[in-house]
Image: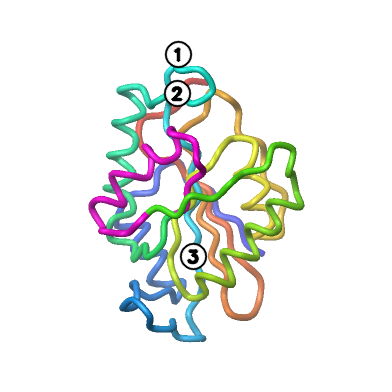
């Protein structure tokens, strides 16, 4: 398992990474991906959320801006599936890219306290349902590291509450070890 860390992943770099990983652009609906293609999973935490709004706040203006930057980063990466939780902040983070690509957002339920078992199941589901594709997963600070860890097979540092700019890319080839790239996108998060 190889890990690469970069401060900022430009759209061109992301496109090159996906191309080099062997993942292919989205197949027509109903078509099966080639069995030799790698599965590429882009993982981001939801963008900055408002402090008001109870348990399901909207994004702040900074969060909406970050969601637009995500479009610039991922629009040419071949994303064919987008996954978010039922919470508004994850869906609002994913929506601009979904709109640009015409890809629906699949809403997945997160079970409170699901921990590693839930993350492992989500990783299995991603690899089974989206084999050979490029998938965007928008989640939460307490779940994304566990999902990335289950996909990549290496420990992932926790995401602090103040961090919104981490972008993890896990490349899972049909055989052999997965590769993890950790980068940043958009405006730097507060320290």
* Residue at 67 percent of width and 42 percent of height: 111
Quarter-wise, where is residue 180 in the image? bottom right
Task: Mark 2 and mark 1 in contact? Answer it, CB < 8 Å.
Answer: yes
In space, the residues marked 2 and 1 are separated at their CA atoms by 6 Å
| Precedes in sequence: disc 3 or disc 2 | 3
Where residue 82 appears, as percent x and y from the top left, is 42, 55
Label 3 element class: strand
Q: Percent position (x, y) of residue 150?
A: 69, 57
Q: Which mark is residue 52?
A: 1
Measured in 3D between alpha carbons, the distance from the residue under mark 3 to the one under mark 1, in whole angstroms, is: 35 Å
Quadrant location of the N terminus in the rendered image = bottom right
Magenta-drawn stretch contains 97: yes
The span shown in magenta is 83-104
Mark 2 Cα shell of 10 Å, populated few (<14), some (14-19), many (≥20): some
Q: Nearer the viewer, mark 3 or mark 2?
A: 2
Residue denoted by label 2: 57
Residue at 43% across, 26% down: 48
**Mark closest to the chain's N terminus, 2 or 1:** 1
Q: Is residue 3 above or below residue 29?
A: above
Colour scheme of the rendered structure = rainbow
- Whether the magenta-drawn stretch holds residue 134 is answered as no
Q: Main secondary structure of the magenta part?
A: helix
- Residue at which label 3 appears: 40
- Percent position (x, y) of residue 30? 38, 80
């Amino acid at each position: 398992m190889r890990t690469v860390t970069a401060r900022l992943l430009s759209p061109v770099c992301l496109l090159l990474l996906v191309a080099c990983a062997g993942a292919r652009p989205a197949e027509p609906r109903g078509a099966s991906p080639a069995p030799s293609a790698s599965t590429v999973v882009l993982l981001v935490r939801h963008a900055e959320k408002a402090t008001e709004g109870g348990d399901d706040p909207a994004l702040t203006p900074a969060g909406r801006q970050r969601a637009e930057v995500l479009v610039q980063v991922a629009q040419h990466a071949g994303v064919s599936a987008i996954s978010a939780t039922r919470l508004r902040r994850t869906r609002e983070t994913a929506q601009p890219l979904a709109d640009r690509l015409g890809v629906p957002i699949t809403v997945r339920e997160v079970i409170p306290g699901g921990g590693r078992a839930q993350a492992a199941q989500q990783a299995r589901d991603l690899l089974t349902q989206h084999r050979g594709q490029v998938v965007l997963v928008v989640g939460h600070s307490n779940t994304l590291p566990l999902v990335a860890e289950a996909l990549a097979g290496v420990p992932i540092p926790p995401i602090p509450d103040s961090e919104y700019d981490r972008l993890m890319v896990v490349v899972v080839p049909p055989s052999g070890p997965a590769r993890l790239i950790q980068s940043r996108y958009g405006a730097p998060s507060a320290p």
